[in-house]
Amino acid sequence: MDIIEDNKTAVFEEGKEDALPTSNGRVKLHNARLKSIQDDHLYHIALSTGSDDLRRLFGDVKVVCFGGQATRMEKFAWFIAREFDVSDTVHNFAAGTDRYAVYKAGPVLSVSHGIGIPSLSIVFQEIVKLIYYAGCENVTFFRIGTCGGIGLEPGTGRMDGAFCEHEEEEKFLWLREIADRGVTNMEMESLGFTALCDRANIPGAVCCVTLVDRCEGDGITNNLQLLQEWQTYPQILVARYIRNRLDL
Amino acid sequence: MDIIEDNKTAVFEEGKEDALPTSNGRVKLHNARLKSIQDDHLYHIALSTGSDDLRRLFGDVKVVCFGGQATRMEKFAWFIAREFDVSDTVHNFAAGTDRYAVYKAGPVLSVSHGIGIPSLSIVFQEIVKLIYYAGCENVTFFRIGTCGGIGLEPGTGRMDGAFCEHEEEEKFLWLREIADRGVTNMEMESLGFTALCDRANIPGAVCCVTLVDRCEGDGITNNLQLLQEWQTYPQILVARYIRNRLDL
């Protein structure tokens, strides 16, 4: 079980006055114009301030967990619902679209972000607006997912691209060099995720499990069942945090 | 009906010898190592050369249409199946994952790419590998989707971001300035799409319908039914091309 943790961004950070949350731990948005919008459509998650009572639906949210795939985030929501007995069922509040999925289990939102930072950035900013409109307090964000390990134990990963022109040995030399410098994993979303958490002044962390040691190769060597078990590891770790934080 | 067309990349382009297709119109990949891979897992579309008879399943493909959402691409596949009477049903060949969807209707693949270039790039390169392994000949790619218009007629679009700090007037001045310079739309994937078509030496084009005139605002002013009707416009245009090209 290899987990990369990246704790970030205290709620009250000095020298960041424009992004400080208010004293009750609510998120404060940069865009002052939002206050004057009568009906703000959170278009990509199919919710709006005009049609949905966001305060009633989401006011109790304390933790938002993001991950790539909708099915995985639905499973995580069920895991939280059962593990902490906080909900009899889970519901996709973004069912009006297939761009993203937004599941809720008690005080935990479980949100899919798709692949890559542009896809992540759109749902991230709409979720930030959602917790702002819902009046949520002291919310923490996580990204839970998978990554390629660099010098860590393996599983599977992305195959060689159609457009690669480098030699295999060249690639491995480069990966071993960055492993020697202390880099232990690679994935596509954490850079944007942590930057946006910082920008929103929301405490955020990334927990990813490695599915392959890229220093050894990028072929699939493990079966689907094992891969799916590995993908629960970051979920279990974050659930442990949620249990302690919310005293469940 | 506002359609942005961007015809690109002749199949036989001079001075690009490393990317030239073979004389039978097959795609030629840069990555020479692919020939030595016994079982190449197209991981993100849940297909592989070892388990799936790609030549039998996809050998007749002549046109690949990419678009953001899986449901929209399923509808497009049904539209092609019925319009040209090429298939009784449509099937999602990537059903083993929820990352992307790959529908087939006769010689047309209808593929979802998610949001943003990183998401697009992953499925794009696996589809290029798929048509390579399937031995497809003279394939054309399209992206069909939606975009924000700049000085074009409206509909709806993305709401103001949580992190925007600019004044509204400032934004509109900037948009009007680029409209004056002949820029008529904005979206997230075409830059990467056309660059990858060029790199793969596959003829490609982008057809997007504008859903909002961003010079006027970015609020939702049209109903869902109208928006959905607009989204069929690029599909109808591309279907017209397919009819002529394949003599259906």
Image (cartoon, coloured by chain):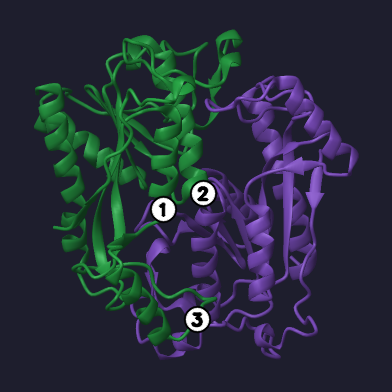
Chain colours: A green, B purple
Query: Dot 2, how many residues are within 10 Å of its Cα: few (below 14), some (14-19), or many (20+)?
Result: many
Which residue is tagged 2? B114
Would you identify the image quadrant in which residue A88 lies?
top left
Dots 1 and 2: beta carbons under 8 Å? yes
Residue type indicated by callout 2:
Gly
Which chain is mark 3 on? B
| CA gap, disc 1 and disc 3 | 21 Å
Q: Position of residue A246 (x, y in %)?
A: 15, 22
Q: Is residue B145 visible?
A: yes
What is the x, y in percent for residue A3?
20, 53
User: Callout 1: few (<14), some (14-19), or many (20+) C-alpha neighbours within 10 Å?
Assistant: many
**Which residue is denoted by mark 1 in the rendering?**
B99
**Residue B2 position within the rendered picture, expressed as x and y whole percent measured from the top left:** 81, 40
Mark 3 Cα within 10 Å, few/some/many (few <14, many 20+)? many
In the image, A141: left or right of A164? left
Of helix, strand and loop, which one carries label 2?
loop
Callout 2: chain: B
Q: Is residue B85 visible?
A: no
Callout 1: residue from which chain?
B
Q: Which residue is mark 3?
A: B133
Distance CA(mark 1)–CA(mark 2) = 8 Å
How far across and down, in percent of the image, does residue A70 sit?
Answer: 35, 43
Tally of numbered discs: 3
Please name whichever residue, B219 or B73, is drawn nearer the observer in this view of the structure.
B219
Q: Secondary structure at mark 1?
A: loop
In the image, residue A32 sits, relative to residue B240, either above or below, namely: above
Mark 3 or mark 2, whichever is nearer to me: 2
Q: Tell me the residue at 59%/75% (across/down).
A: B60
| Mark positioned earlier in the residue sequence (3 or 2) | 2
Q: Is residue B41 above or below residue A190?
A: below
Identity of the residue drawn at 50% across and 12% down: A51
